[in-house]
Amino acid sequence: MSATHLDSLDKIVSLAKSRGFIFQSSEIYGGLGAVYDYGPLGVELKRNIQAAWWKAMTQVHDNIVGIDAAIFMHPKVWKASGHVDGFNDPMIDDKESKKRYRADMLIEQHIFKLRQNGDDDKADELQKELDTTGTRKGLCEDLYDIIMQEEIRSPDSGAFDWTEVRQFNLMFKTHYGALAKDDDDVIYLRPETAQGIFVNYKNVLDTARVQVPFGIAQIGKAFRNEVVARQFVFRMREFEQMEMQYFVEPGTDGEEYEKWLQTRMDWHKSIGIREENLRVSPHPDDKLAHYARAAADIQYQYPIGWQEVEGIHNRSDFDLSQHQEFSGKKMEYFDQKNQKRYIPYVIETSVGLDRTTLMVLCDAYREEEVDGDSRTVLKIHPKLAPTKVGIFPLIKKPVLQELARKIETELKEDYTVLYDEAGSIGKRYRRQDEAGTPFCITVDFDGVESDGEDTVTIRYRDDMKQDRIPVSRVAEVIRDGMKSWKAG
Ligand code: ATP
């Protein structure tokens, strides 16, 4: 059996659509750029990822609790957080097509192309230049200089006719209330979920009987008016984040940061992502945000190159201090045991749910040659698989259908199952391979007409092996198969 791995996002985009994982938003109207809807298989996959994250970040810790904060927040929150004044991306416009691009992304794409063409030395040199932007003339000027020097052309028009690089705020603004009309009523769609946690830090401290160190976890929507938004669900304007802010005593932050970086890396492996496709990319000290003491990206090797899927940040006491200043409310923690008062430091783990979903799909995707035939299969970790078990009567005969329905009813209590009697058995297997279903049960005449207990065939997605097992063992075999699965 030979396998081909993924070399572009196109195959994932088309499989996602044809199998009902992910659709473009408002597609019948031509679609809405960088906004996507999850279909029947996609929503199951996404919820399973959410559940795995929630369990790993709350349930197994006795000092991490969850919250679900509203998307709308007091406008002052975004002043305090620095988003009103500083949440900008460096943009450049193509004068010919009038299209706007993120300047650093244009350079990254150029570097990616250089690598594809085997010019690694040039790519390395340019990457170094990109990593040190802001240290020569200034952020915008340095990016502009690289674009000029490399004669990077517009991806759409091919023109080399750029404006200056300018900063552009990414927050979506709207007006709040029926009588809203002036700037006082401006409200933002939150560009990150973290601030919902910071403004609730006191509430949680006062009600949840937690002591530093403790964490608050949250899953929720965030909105950014991204300009470069052409990479499917990698960069969206409406997306979902899974964040955990861990409040620690200053001085212990370095150790906690390292611990969480490792813990989060392990989580990505625990959901079946192959180790060789994951890496940690620390931010160099001179590129850190002014409030950050350390930061690293967990990157995945997407078909579009190594890209961030999660950020781990040591945010110092910046956020709580800012909210203390802007709200006038004390954010201090009193450590009774040591009779100390301080504003806790925050270690943040922030992962995109949509980018994780895309990572899971990319990592699971295989095209395989099997005995002269080919199949596309998603080798998703069984705990994330949208459908766990496909149940097929070999043909539409009552004796087979009845037993298949009986097994379906029993398994439904614990698993998402799919009963399918349409088409040849080979086609039904292939459909489930593409949906990532790890187990299929086929009910045939050999099983129901034999003496003694009824038997069925269980077929495994990954190696396509088939075993005949008694009906009474089906649940147990599936349970064991779920537990013992390993990424291959
Ligand atoms: P990038 O540099 O790729 O724009 P970022 O550093 O701005 O990402 P963070 O603000 O650290 O991202 O957000 C945390 C996580 O949220 C990211 O690691 C990513 O998984 C996710 N995320 C951020 N922006 C988007 C987006 N536009 N679409 C989908 N996911 C996103």
Image (cartoon, rainbow, N blue to C red):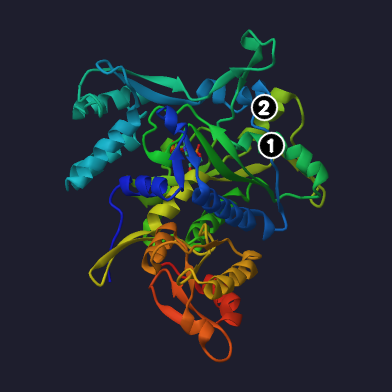
Is disc 2's CB within 8 Å of ligand 1? no
Residue at the bottom extreme, as displayed: 451
Q: Name the residue at 22% across, 24% down.
A: 157
Up-down relation of residue 227 to residue 479 (above or below) = above
Up-down relation of residue 266 to residue 220 (above or below) = below
Q: Name the residue at 48% across, 25% down.
A: 170
Can you identify the residue that label 2 sits on?
73
Q: Secondary structure at mark 1?
A: loop
Is disc 1's CB within 8 Å of ligand 1? no
For the C terminus, the quadrant is: bottom left
Quarter of the figure with residue 231: top left
Quarter of the figure with residue 429: bottom left
Q: Name the residue at 41% across, 49% down.
A: 299
Relative side of 77 to 137, left or right: right
In the rendering, at what x and y percent does residue 388 appear?
A: 53, 64
Relative side of 260 to 326, left or right: left
Say which of 201 and 268 sits in front.
Answer: 268
Mark 2: which amino acid? Met
Say which of 426 and 368 sits in front.
Answer: 426
Up-down relation of residue 415 to residue 97 (above or below) = below
Up-down relation of residue 243 to residue 364 (above or below) = above
* Residue 69 badge: 1
For the N terminus, the quadrant is: bottom left
Contact between marks 1 and 2 (CB within 8 A): the answer is: yes
Mark 1: which amino acid? Ala
Give the Cα distance between marks 1 and 2.
Answer: 9 Å
Say which of 106 and 487 sits in front.
Answer: 487
In the rendering, at what x and y percent does residue 182 appear?
A: 63, 8
Is disc 1 surrounded by few (<14), some (14 to 19) or many (20+) residues within 10 Å? some
